[in-house]
Structures are given as structure tokens and as C-alpha cells.
Image (cartoon, coloured by chain):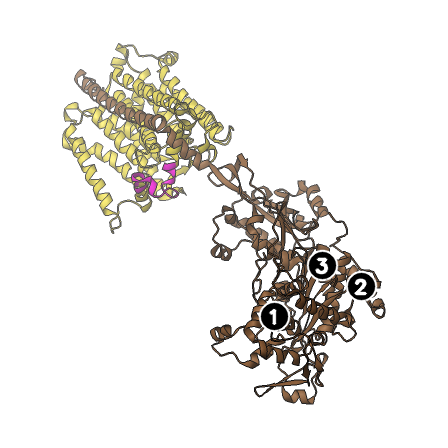
Amino acid sequence: MSYLEYNAKYVPTGLRKPLYLNWPLILLLSAVAGFGFLMLYSVAGGSATPWMEPQVKRFGVGMAAMFVIAMVPIWFWRNMSAMAYAVSLVLLLYVEFFGAVGMGAQRWIDLGFMRLQPSELMKIASVMVLAAYYDWLAPSRTSRPLWVILPVLLISLPTLLVLKQPDLGTAILLLAGGGAVMFAAGVHWAYFASVILAGIGAVVAVLQSRGTSWQLLKDYQYRRIDTFLDPSNDPLGAGYHITQAKIALGSGGWTGKGFMQGTQTRLNFLPEKHTDFIFTTLAEEFGYIGASALLLLYALIIVFCIISALQSRDRFSSLLTLGIAMTFFLFFAVNMAMVMGLLPVVGVPLPLVSYGGSAMLVLLGAFGLVQSAHVHRPR
Amino acid sequence: MRRPTRDSGESLRGISRRALVLGAAQFGFMGILAARMRSMQVEEAEQYRLLADENRINLRLLAPSRGLVFDRNGIPLAVNEQNYRVVMVREDAGDIREVLERLRRLIPLSDEDIERAIEDMMRHSPFVPVTIAERLTWEEMARVNINAPALPGVQAEVGLSRAYPLGSDTAHVVGYVGPVSDFDLSRIDDQDPLLQIPKFQIGKTGVENKLEKTLRGSAGTRRIEVNALGRVMREIDRVEGMPGNDVQLTLDAALQSYVEARLEGESAGVVVIDLENGDLRAIASAPSFDPNLFVRGISTRNWTELNENPFRPLAAKAVQGTYPPGSTFKLATALAAVEAGVLDPEETIYCRGYVEVSGNRFHCWKPTGHGNINLHESLKQSCDCYYYEICQRVGIDLISEMAVRLGLGQRYDLPLSAVAEGLAPTRDWKLKVRGEDWRIGDTVNASIGQGFVLASPLQLAVMAARVATGRQITPRLVRAIDGIEQPSMSDAPLGINENILRRLRAALDAVSNHTRGTAYGSRIVPDDRRLAGKTGTSQVRRITQEEREAGITSNEDLPWERRDHALFVGYAPVEAPRYAIAVVVEHGGGGSTAAAPIARDVLLQAMFDGPPPLSAYPANLRSQIETQQERIKERIAPGSSTSGRA
């Protein structure tokens, strides 16, 4: 989009911009966050502290950031893409070497008021830079090998860095998120087919390498895979998380045990009940109805994003919106699949619901970009 | 701005197609998630709900209250006492050391106690209450309660613990309880889940041990909700267990206490049997020990003291001690000879102080001999030679058979620890056990209750009871369980000619009531309470010929453990026997001087159901008896008041 076009077609300006925000999307995001507040209140045993209150504040800050970002024209963000990517990459490298050590892996930078996880930033920055790249690239070249290598490098560089942290969940998100943008941009399907085949090969290699000198993953990651494949073989050790999560989820039944009545949660059988496993609390206390309601809200967010992407008039907006939608989808899909025992436990939070600052702020910022694309669409 | 975005329709359409493919894939996956959620939460919900309940619900056992033990009059012998204790919860206490220091100013706590408490607390989860001190007095308890605000995490609790009000008086009979040990678990085949409770108290000795199942009761259950750390969140429901059954013994607590007091300073065993039904009125072993020490966990010092005491306080001498019965065994020898028809009671045998049997010389206790002597006189004066003679006529097997009929050489089925079998030796026994032939000298030794013959005070009392009644009196210890009277055991006639028994009893009467009787000094004055019996003095050492010639060393000059055992078996009153008794005083010297007076005092106490009047005693003894009664009254009075009878 250019100034020419900008002038030729109607694009909202100034104080009119808020009127053109994607308000249904904002309502959906707030509803999801509301679920989160409710659950954080419940897992704290009916108390706003220690989780709900800071989460509400962060949501407020995140929403404010979203509005600010939405008000800034989308082309500005397109031009900032490369910069965002570079900064994220530098920060990732920084935590790789100087980051505070927590949870057995170097993952964050202490900013004083919050702990910033560069890997969270990178989830969005990589989508941005890929969208900008395909916006810049002539469509005819999209599937040419030379022009495929560059985005592959852009994706694999941070992926390898987070794998080294090691953060399997983020690596999956980066890979699949970036892949989705490439796919949407029209890269030939044969590339994806070969990557999937290579992926299967890699999985075989990873499993084969176990116990040898060139072992590719850490022991605990292997144990997580074992546990995923058969949680019952270690019900009190590594399989404990997933077994208890499934019990909590399943025992919820149709209507759940009632708000703050979840025995699994209240009696501390659930691990990380306020972060990665918060969905199990929701499923236990509100049952199938409550859990499907959240899934529906998530689905609607995806629907609104895809609609917004389809309405976009430029490739950057379209690809960015799709990429962010994909990343968001990956967040909740991987998390839910994980607690239901469909995927190994990889440490991906439930977006906007799990307790945690970085993810909340980055996700709301990302939706700010989606809003910006939505607002600044020529009509 | 740089280059305009290429928003050619073609490329945007491509994006739209791919976007729809992506969207479809996303919704496909969400469909899988929804389906999975449905199958878990709807189809398999029951199964998961069950698992969730298993997770949170724990079954805890409730220990039932142990059955009580009473004496025949309802005086408690074993009770469950309220036990005030102080427990502490680490997580509520904050600075545990500081709190313990404050607690220390209120109740006595040693450095050791404090270290142990801290160690205990650190070993358990922070919410587990750890016992800091037990058995506090009510005042200490009150002090802790009043200062509760300054003692975070400290709670005063009331629990039940076993106590034995009569202490050492009934220690050997009632026994004691203690925490179940791995050794106990390996030894007993008992599936009772109660035994899995840590420190569950089970009977270790005596009635507590033998009637364990009766006293224990059955476990109650408590369903509780616990969290993942095992912390109890709330109680869901509880089913109380069945308390153990109460046991009433045949013991007479007052008499028992009296006997224990009377035996003070001796190492002795006394058994008193009620001749009406075989009830054991007293089973006393001295010295005794305080069973309460064991319940509380005995200190090493006390334990060593009890173990190293030469008087063996832990041994229940009355039922598990076996002794050569000495002259008391002459009853069996005499009855066997008369029954076999080889001896006429009136026949006299000449005693010249010794008898030569197959080259060995067997001595009478009286070196100068008794001269011509018949059965009556032989019992009264306890002549040995008479028995050396008659035993050779009747033979050991018939003597043993008679001994068994009189109650020796057999184990009574009583709920007591290590009831002794004793020994009534036969030819077969010696061949089998020792691999040697029986020799005539063995018979001669056995005829006066020496050599192989062994009997416990309980068996000797049974013998006295059977001789006194002519019936097969069998001892009984349990009078009632849970209020239901237990049957007395067989008391069929002995099958011994009553005329012979009457002669024997007349001789026993003379033993303590004829001036030349061996127990004349221990006679009971009122005619209707007369004592009859037989003294016994059993050697524990061999007297060599040289020693005999040099003059036998008197007991007083020997070291304690080489002195003779003093025995007495008897009954009273002579005319209508009511109580039988056996007294064994280990290394007490002569039966007439050491054992008979005890029997006299105990039987008088039993007959008068309390202290007898001094007039029951011969005039020359009265002042001495008076001081003895005072001394015993003082000893019984504290702690074991038996005046208030139920």
C-alpha cells in the first residue's frame, strides 16, 4: 500500500481509527482473559492473590499496548519488521550467554519490573519478518529454491537458539508459525512435503541417537517422550503430571465439579496448575461445557483473524494476520493437546489464560498488529 | 516509503486459498481436541472420577480402645489412662527452636528431647504433628494451654495409653503392652491391619499378650480427604471400631498386693488357689518390676538394672520357675507307694540317718536318724530314709504317674507367659532325653524331690489343692470375658482312695500343728482356720562326704546362690479346706523357717479377707507379726489402695 493508494481509497485517520478496530476480536480476547482470571482466582483457593491480580494488571497494560500498536499505521510496522527480528535475535543470543538462570534453562532477561523472554518476542518477530519478506518478494519468485532458503534461515536460526535453551515448545511454535506464513505466501507444497519427510527422519534420528555419543536431546526430554508414550509406567515420577492432568480433565464430566470445587486442583495433585496446566482446572471445574466454551472462543478468534486476513488488501497485512493467528492457534492447540495426553509435555502456556507476563504482553502486542492491519485496511 | 506493496489480485487470491487451507487444518485439529475432550469428559468421565476420588480419599485406621483387665472384685489391673501430651506442627511454629525454648520454661524438656523433637520434625512433612512430650501432669498441661498464644504450632492433646494401677504387684500376671515391632510382625501370623499402625500397642507378656485378640478389639476406619502432599484436608466419614473386650481375672488384687509386699526382700514365688473352683487368687513373683516403665519405653539404665539383678525381677517365678520340690514331693512318693499296695501306712521303717543303696550312701536331713517311723511320722518330721526305702518298692514310673495325677509335670493352659512344664521323670524320659539308663540312685533322689524332679510353684499349689480336696482341681485365671463367666475346668475326683488321703491330710495337719512337726512354728491358732502342709528344703549343691564329716555348713554361712531353696505346700482351713498354697523361696534356707511363715501369713490374709487379728498367731510371735503387718500396710497403702471394693 502506498501513500497514493492511501489517499485514493478511504483509510481511517486520527480519532476515527478506534471506530474501525476489530471490536469482536477485542471482546473475544477479553472473554478468554476473563476465563483466565476466573481460573487463577480458583487455583489460588478463592483469592485474587497471588495470581489473578497481577494478571489483571498485565492484561490492562497489554490492552493499552494493543491499542497503541493498533493506532500506528501497519506500514510502519512492516518497516520495523527486520529491526524487530534483529533485536529479538540479539536478545536471544544475549540470554543464551548472559541470561538469568531459572527453571534449569536460560530464558529471560530481568528488566526489573518484569522478566522478558526474548523467545516470546521472537515468535511474533519471525512472523513479522517473514510477512515483510514475502511482501517484498515478487510472487513469481516465491517458490524458487534460492528465495526459499532465506526464509528457512530466518526461521531456523532462532529455532536452533531456543532448542539449545532448551525450549521445545517455543521451537515448535517458531517452526510451525514460520512455516504457516511461508505456506500462506504460496511456497510450493513440495517443499513442505519434503520438510515433513525430513521431520519424520529427524524424529527417527532423535530416537535412535538416545544413549549414544551424539544424543540430540537432553535426558529429561527423552523421559518426557517416554512418559508421553506411556504415562502409566511412571505414575509418580515423570508421568505424574500427565496422569494427574488427565484425571482432572476427565473427572470434570459434562458440567464439572463447580467453581472452586475441583479436587485435583484444590488438593494440589495438579502440577503447575496456574501456568501450563490451567486448562485442566477449567475442565475439572466447568466440565465439558466450560472447556468447549473456551475452545469455541479460541476458534472464533481464529475465525475473525482469518476473515480479517482475507479482507486485507496487501500481502504484509494478510500474511502477518495469518501468521499471528497460526501462532496463537499453536499456543492453545499444543497446550490443550499436551494436557489431554495427545502431545508430549513441552511447556507451552494456554494463551491469555495461563499466568505469565511475557506471553500475555507479547500476544496482546501481536493482536495490536492484527488490529493495525485491520484498521489501516483501505476500504 | 519505499516500494509500493504488490497487491496484485492474483497473489492475494493465492494467499486466500492457502489461508483457507490453513484455517481448515486448524479447525480440523480443534475438532480432534473437541472430540478428545468429549471422549475423556463424557464417555470416560466415570473412570476418571473414580481415579480422582482414589487420589484424594485416604482410609485411616482408628485404633479401638483396648479392653480393660479387672481382678475378681472389679478392681482395675490394666486401664487406659488419659495421657496429656504436647505436639508441635513445624509449619505453624515458625522458629521451632525459639518455640521449644519457650516451651521448655513451662514443662521439663531435656536437651536430648529437644534435639529429638527437631530431628523428628525435620524428617516429616511440615504439617505432621510431632509429639514433643508425653504424660504431662494436668498442671503442666494447663500451663501450656494458658501460654498458647506464645507457642505457635504447639497443641496440647489427650490420648489414651495403657497403665497398670497396681504396678509391680501384677506385673508378671497382667504383663504389659508395647509398640508392635518388626520382630512381632514376623513372629505372629496376624492379618489385622491395626498392626500396621506405627507404634500400635500390643501385649508383650502375660495376659496382655496371651489374650491379645480378646483385648485388642477391631479397627475403625476414617475416610479423609488428603492433598497431593498427604495433608489431611477434612474428614469425610468415620466408622468406629469395636473396643476390645474387658477381661476379669480370678486374681484377688488385695491378696496379690499383700503377697507381693510380704515377699519383699526375697526372691520367691507364691501361688494361692481357691479350692472351690480352682481360681487362682494370687500368683506372686518377687521381686517384681513396674510394667508402666515398659509402656513408656524403658530406659537403658532401668533395663540393665532389671536384667542384672541376681533376683531376676523379670522372671515370673510362680509359673515359669521350676525347682526341685524337695520334701514336698514326698506326698507323691507316699501316695504312689500306698496306692500300689507296697506300703502299709502303719508299717514302720527304721531310720539310722542314712541308707546305702548300691554302694552309695543317701543321707537323712537328721544325721542321727529318726529311729522307727511310720508314714504319719515320716511326713510330720520329714524323714528322708523312709522315702529312700519305699521308693525302691514302688519304682520311679508309678511315682511319676502319681506326681502327674497330682498336677506336676504338665503345662496348664493359662494365659500367662512361659508357663513351665516342670518334670516328673520316668525311665523312658531319661533314656530318650539323656540317652542313659535309669539308675536306682535316681529313684532315691527323686523320692525326696531332688535329682531330676522339677516343679513350679503353680504345680505345687495344684498338688496341695488336689491332696486337700481329693478332686482334680485345675487352675483357672480368667473369670469372665466381656462379662461372660468362663467355665471352670474339670474337677473330677482324683480317684485316690479317700481313706489314704485322709491319713495323708492328718499327717499334713500334724506338720504344722503338732509340736514335733516341721512347720509347728508357723501354726495358725484358731482351730477352725488351722493350717496343714508340707515343708521342703531342696539342695542346689551337692554335699560331699568330707563336708558332711566336717559338719555341714549352715545356710547362713553360704553365699546366697548356693543356699537351699525353701518350699512349703499347704492348705487351710484343715477341716474345710478353702485355699491351697505353694511357696518357693529361692535360696531361702529351710522350708520350715523361710517358706512356711509366708504361707501362714498369706492364707490368714486370704481367709480373713484382710489383715487377720493377732490372736490368730501364737502368742510368742504376736509383737513381731504386728510390726510386720505395719510394714506391709505401709508398703501397700501408697498408690495401690484396695480398700474401695467394687
Q: Amino acid at mark 2?
A: Asp
Query: Residue B462's image quarter?
Result: bottom right
Q: Can you identify the residue that label 1 sits on?
A: B339
Q: Give the percent coordinates (x, y) of residue B24.
A: 24, 22
* Above or below: residue B348 compared with residue A223: below
Neighbour tally class for label 3: few under 14, some 14-19, many 20 plus, Cα within 10 Å = many
> Which of B239/A126 is in front?
B239
Chain letter for the residue marked with disc 2 in the picture: B
Which numbered disc flags the more N-terminal residue, 3 or 2?
2
Chain of the residue on which disc 1 is drawn: B
Q: Residue at x 25, y 30 (%)?
A: A178
User: What's under tag 1, amino acid-wise?
Assistant: Glu
Image quadrant where residue B337 sits: bottom right
Chain under label 3?
B
Tally of marks? 3
Q: Is residue B307 above or below residue B233?
A: below
The answer for how far apart the CA atoms under marks 3 and 1 are is 26 Å
The magenta region covers A225-243
Place of residue A325 in the rendered image (x, y in percent of width and height, measured from the top left): 30, 24
- The residue pinned by badge 2 equals B527
Q: Which residue is mark 3?
A: B578
Task: Please identify which colour was used for chain A in the image.
Answer: yellow
Q: CA distance from mark 2 to mark 1?
A: 31 Å
- Chain-order first, disc 2 or disc 1: 1
Circle 1 — which element?
Answer: helix
Indicate the secondary structure of the residue bearing disc 3.
loop
Q: Is residue A365 above or below residue B278?
A: above
